[in-house]
Image (spheres, grey):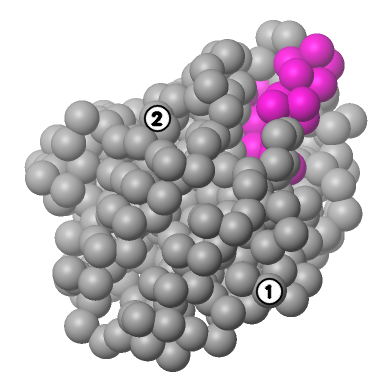
Amino acid sequence: MRIYMAPMEGITRYIYRNAQHTHFGGVDTYFTPFLSPSQHHRFTVRERRDVLPEHNRDMHIVPQLLTNRAEDFIWAARELRQLGYEEINLNLGCPSGTVAAKYKGAGFLAKKEELQHFLDEVFMALDLKISLKTRIGVERPEEFYDLMEIYNRFPLSELIIHPRVRTDFYRNTPNLEIFKDAVRLCKSPVCYNGDLFTSSDYREFVQEFPSVDRLMLGRGLIANPGLAREMLGGPSVDADHLFRMHQDVYMGYRSEIPEANNVLFKMKELWAYMAYLFEDCRKYVKRIRKARSFTEYEDAVRELFSSCRIMEGAGFAGREMPA
């Protein structure tokens, strides 16, 4: 089984990827949070920093692009090719209202004719691997059958499917009936993405879809950075390695981000997921959320690790951790 780390904006950038890879591993491919090339044809400083080869050593990285303009995708793909990347992923899954309103991400799925023309231009111009990460439609699951006809026209390196529609955001449950049809109909290799939060979820999925040999983990892997390793039969996450990983991420942010408030915001965002691993941790998580200085934050984190144990089989529950 090949396991991928999903791109999560604001979380899975190179500092986090390196820390997860060092302390837990189990991930075959890391997809970057989307880069959004503009008509000015330049990456932001933050985007370029995230894909620099020296920031991604010893990991297989696939950059993801968010755009609905073929010329911008082609420019960005060629720039990334010069950095050594051999595969580019197109984001057709982001459900954000501001993104979809511009007909990007999952919003692009509403423009099927334009999407087909986009892919025609991209595949004609580029000779590198191109994969897609898609939802199954904008409002109705049945939209996916028309999308599949489009996707099957092109030699995709793989099709990563999150079987929700755009209007679901992350509510409801993934539509496994549509995914079954996708496995049957798709001419390209298929990767599944959606609500695999524990090793038990993984075992159930493998039993139902024995022919699927690649999975993408998102929120479940952020909550439990050792989840990929566990799914492959390795040891469960332990507090010592989790704390070391936390320190690498925390100090990495402190070295890169000058404003203390921004560092704390990013760490609190991580704890919205990692808190699910710990037993009886609410009061400590509340202290982390209320921290206004590095000292307050560090004290709260140390208390959580010293006072709360990691629960066996714990994982993200699909909702925000209560305060």
> Which contiguous range is marked in magenta?
186-209
Q: Is residue 180 left or right of residue 39?
A: right
Q: Are marks 1 and 2 in contact (CB under 8 Å)?
A: no
Alpha-carbon span between mark 1 and mark 2? 30 Å
Specify the quadrant of the image occupied by residue 319.
bottom right
**Residue occupying image coordinates x 61% and y 22%:** 231
Q: Position of residue 314 (x, y in %)?
A: 72, 41
Q: In the depicted view, which residue is nearer to us: 115 or 276?
A: 276
Quarter occupied by the C terminus: bottom right
**Closer mark to the observer between disc 1 and disc 2:** 1
**Residue occupying image coordinates x 84% and y 32%:** 176
Question: Is the residue 208 above or below the residue 13 in the image?
Answer: above
In the rendered picture of this protein, how many numbered marks are placed on residues?
2
Specify the quadrant of the image occupied by residue 12.
bottom left
- For label 2, the crowd category at 10 Å Cα-Cα, with few meaning under 14, some 14 to 19 and many 20 or more, is some
Magenta includes 198? yes
Magenta includes 139? no
Q: In the depicted view, which residue is nearer to us: 44 or 114?
A: 44
- For label 1, the crowd category at 10 Å Cα-Cα, with few meaning under 14, some 14 to 19 and many 20 or more, is few
Specify the quadrant of the image occupied by residue 179.
top right
Q: Is residue 225 left or right of residue 201?
A: left
Q: Position of residue 285 (x, y in %)?
A: 62, 71
Q: Say what amino acid the circle numbered 1 marks.
A: Lys
Q: Say what amino acid the circle numbered 2 marks.
A: Gly
Q: Is residue 173 left or right of residue 67?
A: right
Helix, strand or loop for disc 1: helix
User: Which residue is label 1 attached to?
Assistant: 283
**Residue occupying image coordinates x 86% and y 47%:** 173
User: Which residue is label 2 attached to?
Assistant: 25
Question: Is the residue 276 above or below the residue 41 in the image?
Answer: above
Q: Position of residue 57 (x, y in %)?
A: 17, 36
